[in-house]
Amino acid sequence: MNIKFRHELINYLIQQYNLKNYLEIGIDDGSNYNKIICVNKVSVDPAIGQYSHAKPTYRMTSDEFFETKSKECEPFDIVFIDGLHHSDQVDKDIANSISNLSDGGFIILHDCNPLRKEEQIIPRNKSGRWNGDVWKSVVRFRNSPSKLGCVVLNTDEGLGIISNRISKNKKFKYNLEYEFLEQNRKECLGLLESINSII
């Protein structure tokens, strides 16, 4: 299976595992969300600024959603996290998503593999390509006591995949300096070229 874009990965998993309930955190202009084919779809975004015309299901932050609205929903089979690209927020989004994830479900993360140091600096200091420091959340999660495995598919700026269908990661010594990522990218991210070797 040749995956190039996030919606292709999400739709592939939905079809492959007959997933019914989808959550997208951070819908931006809706271009990804609108391509997802799933029985039940929910989106969350405060939708301020450039994409305030977007129409999320819940116009609020992900923190607010998980605190006040998520219990109204069935457990999610697949969650796509593409909200605030700051690792401290991504850590919270991962933890909250796991708490609302069905057994055998998937969490997908976008922007996990920045190729230049300036593309991951917080706060964002210029226009142009920017991934934020989502990669730090991947590294921390891969070294966490969670029973879920985590890898990154090397496409579309790096697509992280978290699931109990993925083998648990072996811990490794790390630091969160970008230079360490550059020198140890495959180990840090569990970087893989094909989904066929994961699922």
Image: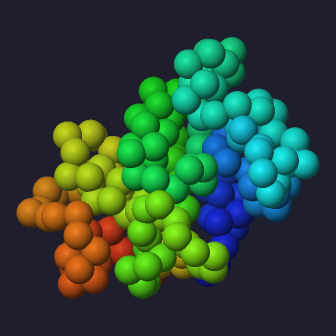
Residue positioned most to the front: 125
**Is residue 62 in sight in this rendering?**
yes
Q: Nearer the viewer, residue 173 or 7?
A: 173
Please name the residue shown 14% across and 56% down the image: 171
> In which quadrant is the N terminus drawn?
bottom right
Relative placement, left or right, of 17 versus 114 is right
Residue positioned most to the right: 53
Classify residue 136 by image quadrant.
bottom left
Please name the residue shown 60% across and 25% down the image: 64
Classify residue 69 by image quadrant.
top right
Please name the residue shown 26% across and 40% down the image: 146
Please name the residue shown 28% across and 74% down the image: 178
Q: Nearer the viewer, residue 125 or 183?
A: 125
**Is residue 162 in sight in this rendering?**
no
Q: Nearer the viewer, residue 97 or 20?
A: 97
Relative placement, left or right, of 41 versus 181 is right
Q: Nearer the viewer, residue 165 or 189?
A: 189
Q: Is residue 187 above or below residue 13?
A: below
Classify residue 166 by image quadrant.
bottom left
Q: Position of residue 96 (x, y in %)?
A: 47, 31
